[in-house]
Image: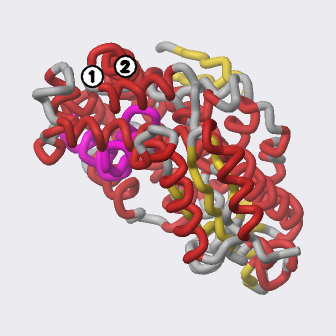
Amino acid sequence: MARRIYHDPLHGPIELDSARPEEAMAMALIDAPPFQRLRRIRQLGPAFLTFHGAESSRFTHSLGVLQLARRALTHLERQLPDLAAHRGLLLGAALLHDVGHGPLSHSGEAMFGLHHEAWSARLIREEASLRDPLEAVAPGTAGAVAALLETGEAPHPAVGALVSSQLDCDRLDYLRRDGYATGMAYGQLDLDRLIAALIVAPDGQLAIHPRGRTAAEHYLVLRSLMYGSVYNHRLNVVGNWLLEWIVRLARRLGPGQVPADAVMGRWLWEPDSLGPESFLANDDVRTGYHLLRWREEAPPPLADLCRRLIDRDLLQATDVASLPAGQRLEALALAQRLCQQAGLDPELTCGLRERRVTGYSPYVGGLRLWDGHRLQALEQVSPLVDSLSRPRELAWLLHPRPVSRELRRQLAAADPRP
């Protein structure tokens, strides 16, 4: 019999006991090389360029999700004891939900054009070090975990909701953890009250008891604030744009001009034939090594993009969300002309990033209140939550520092508003 404790800065001691089959499974999964790889994947991608504390990993986050899922299930089992039969499935999915992330997490998805949910499912099905511990709990567990992560399919809707929903354990952990890592107090969630308020509705889906309404409102407000101040921060937008262009340009230049080892070569120029071994061989360490190497050995355009990222000589970002779509394109054209006049490559120094965001999406597994008699959508009884469901536009014009003053002067002169 073995016990293991992970001391987490947010959740306190996370204790696992091999005498419990599901926890023995979790210990084996944590020790598996594909899961250990998550130590080398930054949780927040290039956000460390803006928030110096944003150095936490997907490994740390995944352990937090495991702990929250275990707490939530223990609470729900008091209402519905039959949920205990799905403990292995839930803990496996909670622990492995991010095992398919590429370098720099979500930034890597945009850089290389992959989807971590699909890769998580594939690795669970094909990697024996992940599949075998899951199957040891109960035959078919590995396939069930893969299906839950890839499609949301679950044998019980409440179990599926704890892994993927508007109030899942993934979101509860990353909001609090990312707030802690970035120094943003917005992420101080009332996890105890939120978990205590979870209830199984008559249709089997998760709902919130009315006494947890304030905690749920607080959670949604904090989520909106974190997206506005951290995830969609203007310099995070710039960092992601640079990373995407680095990969795009490396692929365009080709293996004849861009030095790369065999693993990175497959990621860049043979992505359709990428297998589990090559996928798992890439992480922040290997990608970071290539960024350093390309700064020194790649053709000048690629070398300069890598230099900007490594030395944090980032592009500027001007908020143009208030401009109509046509005027945003005119602003981009203006920035490109100014760059050309300054002897800079407009394609690699100017960009327009637009995004439509909502703080809450009621039609995608929306939150509901259940008091034992009446089931209500949260936005119907909460004006605050209803206000979060209204979409808003984000638009950033990216440009280099040397043209910033003239660009902003001309944009201000062309603005008809008083």
Q: Position of residue 176 (x, y in %)?
A: 73, 40
Q: Pointers 2 and 1 in contact (CB under 8 A)?
A: yes
Question: Looking at the image, which residue is at 52% across and 58% down?
Answer: 352
Q: Is residue 337 left or right of residue 417?
A: left
Residue 185 vs 37, above or below: the answer is: below
Task: Please indicate, yes or no, whether residue 172 appears anywhere in the rendered image.
Answer: no
Residue at image mark 1: 298
Q: Is residue 32 left or right of residue 243?
A: left
Q: Which residues are magenta?
A: 100-127
Q: Nearer the viewer, residue 345 or 142?
A: 345
Residue type at the position of mark 2:
Arg
Question: Looking at the image, which residue is at 49% across and 54% down?
Answer: 337
Image quadrant for the C terminus? bottom right
Q: Position of residue 385 (x, y in %)?
A: 80, 73
Question: Looking at the image, which residue is at 59% across and 79% down?
Answer: 363
Q: Is residue 352 left or right of residue 180?
A: left
Residue type at the position of mark 1:
Ala
Q: Position of residue 209 (x, y in %)?
A: 80, 68
Within the image, what quadrant is residue 313 found in?
A: top right
Residue at image mark 2: 295
Q: Nearer the viewer, residue 311 or 190?
A: 311
Residue 85 vs 2, above or below: the answer is: below
